[in-house]
Image (cartoon, helix red, strand yellow):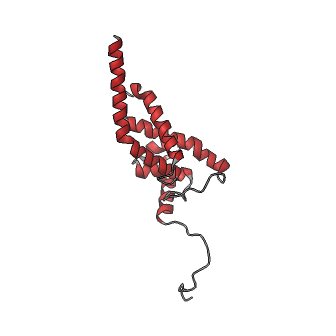
Amino acid sequence: MRDRQVSRQDGRAQEFEAFVAGAAGRLLHAATLLTAEARDANPRARRLLTLALGHTYARWHRLRGEDPYDCARQFLAVRFARTTWHRHRLFGRDRPAPCGPLGALSPQERLVLVLRMYEGVAEEQTAALLGLTAERVHTVCDRATSLVLHPVRPAGPRAANAKVAPS
């Protein structure tokens, strides 16, 4: 009986290892986009990934047909929202400036954009996961997409040789 239990645990561990081998890279990239850290210097993203994989492993035997990737992604998103989104409102200036393509976005905008565009999560599912209305998710996603595609340039002096349009 004990041998059967050990064999079952080994099988679960191997299944989880196979899942991690296939999903960890994509989850780390999503976490790096969320934290707006550099790809090669992303300690917060790696911590998020570690917590998400630990949570998924703890639930592994209870998933019963659920997608483990979806479970890990949900935990990653919710953990990011709880720790960063709310902290940004209170202590936004204490952290170093985010970098990367999504660095100019707020944490909420990054979260919605990553879930919708990078992960392909439906608007309604994103809204339910974050506790927002679908309309709010749509608005935030549109704004974030616009800011990424057409960044706001800081006002500054014009170049000396820039042409000025006639009035």
Q: Nearer the viewer, residue 60 or 3?
A: 3
Classify the position of the N terminus by image quarter. top left
* Residue drawn at point x = 54 percent, y = 43 percent: 80
Which residue is depicted at the point 58% across and 85% down?
160
Q: Where on the picture, by quarter, is residue 61?
A: top left
User: Which residue is at the far top?
Assistant: 1
* Near-viewer residue (44 or 81): 44
When the figure is inspected, residue 103 is found, relative to residue 3, above or below; the finding is: below
Residue 72 appears in view = yes
In which image quadrant can residue 158 be found?
bottom right
Residue 35, horizontal then vertical, whole percent: 53, 50
Horizontally, is 3 left or right of 45 in the view? left
Foreground of the two, 18 or 117: 18
Quadrant the C terminus occupies: bottom right
List x then y, in percent, for residue 73: 44, 40
Counting from the top left corner in percent of width and height, residue 14 is at 34, 29
> Residue at 36% across / 39% down in the picture?
21
